[in-house]
Amino acid sequence: MSVTIHQVMNTSPVMPVMVINQIEQAVPLARALVEGGLKVLEITLRTPVALECIRRIKGEVPDAIVGAGTIINTQTLRQAIDAGAQFVVSPGLTPSLLDAGLGCGVPLLPGVITPSEVMRLLEKGITAMKFFPAEAAGGIPMLKSIGGPLPQVTFCPTGGVNPKNAPEYLALSNVACVGGSWMAPADLVDAGDWAEITRRAAGAAALKK
Ligand code: 3PG
């Protein structure tokens, strides 16, 4: 099933940003998040098993919409697409990655911080962007300020977003969803505490956009 970047951003208020260390964790973790109501999953390419995790989740968790994060060059873009990623997320953007991303047939969520970066993407017709690293880069006041002159952009703030500040981000008119890792932190994943992960996912899924 192919999706648009706006479907990716509007399916759930929170996009789990997942770091998976063991292949065997991938499917139960994805199932736990989907059961809690979070269908859109970003698997970061930060571990050697990440691409195989994407393949397994794609094959075994049909209700999930599986994306790849940490796309930092054309090589990782190609690997993610070959593994079956339905969307791709980058922490920032280079001209070559932008060109490849626009032609790859899979929705791209590129990372930005500044108005100039936003404007460069607008010139290419991109209106959905990741605001990363959200808290370190000015957080809610920064997004409000960018929304003044550039209201046509929709953001997914990620980095330092947590259950406390997520509602305030989600209340912004230029935020569609937030990204975060609090639903599936390493300690819960390593412990196989899928029930707690489902509970956290349900709490995140219930946040209002
Ligand atoms: C990351 O850098 O891992 C993601 O942006 C998630 O950040 P978080 O752990 O602060 O939610």
Image (cartoon, helix red, strand yellow):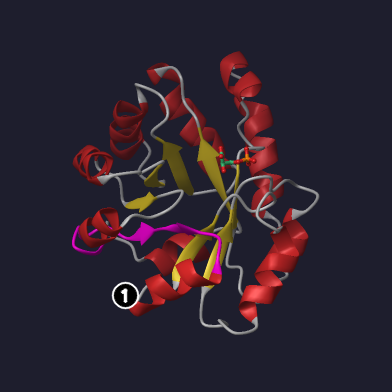
Placement of 40 over or under 57, stated as above or below: below
- 56 left or right of 190 in image: left
Instruction: Please tell me which residue is depicted at 57% across the width and 49% down the height of the picture.
Output: 37
For residue 197, above or below residue 152: above
Q: Position of residue 107 (x, y in %)?
A: 32, 60
Q: Secondary structure at mark 1?
A: loop
Picture quadrant of residue 127 = bottom left
x, y percentage for residue 146? 62, 74
User: What residue does disc 1 label?
Assistant: 124
The quarter of the image holding the C terminus is: bottom right
Residue 208 appears in the figure: no
> Which segment did they paint magenta?
102-114
Q: Is residue 18 visible?
A: yes
What is the chief secondary structure element of the magenta stretch? Answer: loop
Residue extending farthest to the right is 164
Quarter of the figure with the N terminus: bottom left
User: Residue 137, image x and y in percent?
Assistant: 65, 55
Q: Tell me if residue 207 is in the magenta stretch.
A: no
Q: Residue at x 28, y 59 (%)?
A: 95
Q: Residue at x 35, y 22 (%)?
A: 49
Residue 145, quarter of picture = bottom right
Q: Position of residue 31 (x, y in %)?
A: 48, 35
Label 1 Cα crowd, 10 Å radius (few <14 / some 14-19 / many 20+): few
Up/down of 91 relative to 31, above or below:
below
Q: What's under tag 1, amino acid-wise?
A: Lys
On the rendered structure, is 192 left or right of 23?
Answer: right
Magenta-colored stretch includes residue 112: yes
Viewer-proximal residue among 18 and 201:
18
**Image region (quadrant) for ligand 1:** top right
Q: Residue at x 18, y 62 (%)?
A: 103
Question: Quick one: 61 or 90, which is closer to the camera?
Answer: 90
